[in-house]
Amino acid sequence: MGYQPARDTLVVVTLPGEIDITNADRAFDRLETTVSSGAAVVIADFTGTYFCDAAGVRRLVRIRSRAMVRGTQLRLVIPLGGLLRRVLALLEVDHLLPVYPSVGQAGVLAPPAAQDPLTLIG
């Protein structure tokens, strides 16, 4: 039987540096499996991710929707100035996905950090 975390646990899933057509299914399937596992909070760590296309972002939004139905919080970690933050803003989904600048901040019960408007411009 698969790993079943306690309902009050927090699980961190570290995503690869590049998420594209060659590995997106594997990366996001792992994230979806973790969301379905019963953890209270799943942190998707994009700290080292330098590329994720629009299809990947759309999949993140779907995973978040499924998480909400299950009562699981999906939190993204994207450092300030991270390119993925800009992609989320350009695709106008940044308000749908709670983004934190570090795993430590995502692991506490607090609202997501406000995005730095200067980061999104430059």
Image: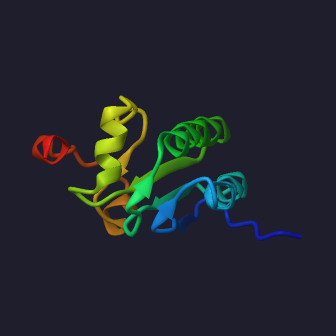
x, y percent for residue 106: 37, 59
**Colour treatment of the image:** rainbow
Q: Is residue 43 left or right of residue 63?
A: left
Q: Is residue 110 visible?
A: no
Q: For residue 121, which quarter of the picture?
A: top left
Residue occupying the far right of the picture: 1
x, y percent for residue 68: 59, 37
Viewer-nearest residue: 4 or 57? 57
Is residue 117 depicted above or below 19 in this figure? Answer: above
Q: For residue 29, which quarter of the picture?
A: bottom right
Q: For residue 70, which quarter of the picture?
A: top right
The residue at the point 21 percent across, 56 percent down is 81
The residue at the point 52 percent across, 58 percent down is 19
Q: Is residue 103 visible?
A: yes
Viewer-nearest residue: 105 or 9? 105
x, y percent for residue 8: 59, 60
Is residue 74 depicted above or below 62 in this figure? Answer: below
Total marks shown come to: 0
The residue at the point 10 percent across, 44 percent down is 118
Residue occupying the far top of the picture: 92
Viewer-nearest residue: 37 or 7? 37
Q: Is residue 66 left or right of residue 89?
A: right
The residue at the point 28 percent across, 61 percent down is 79
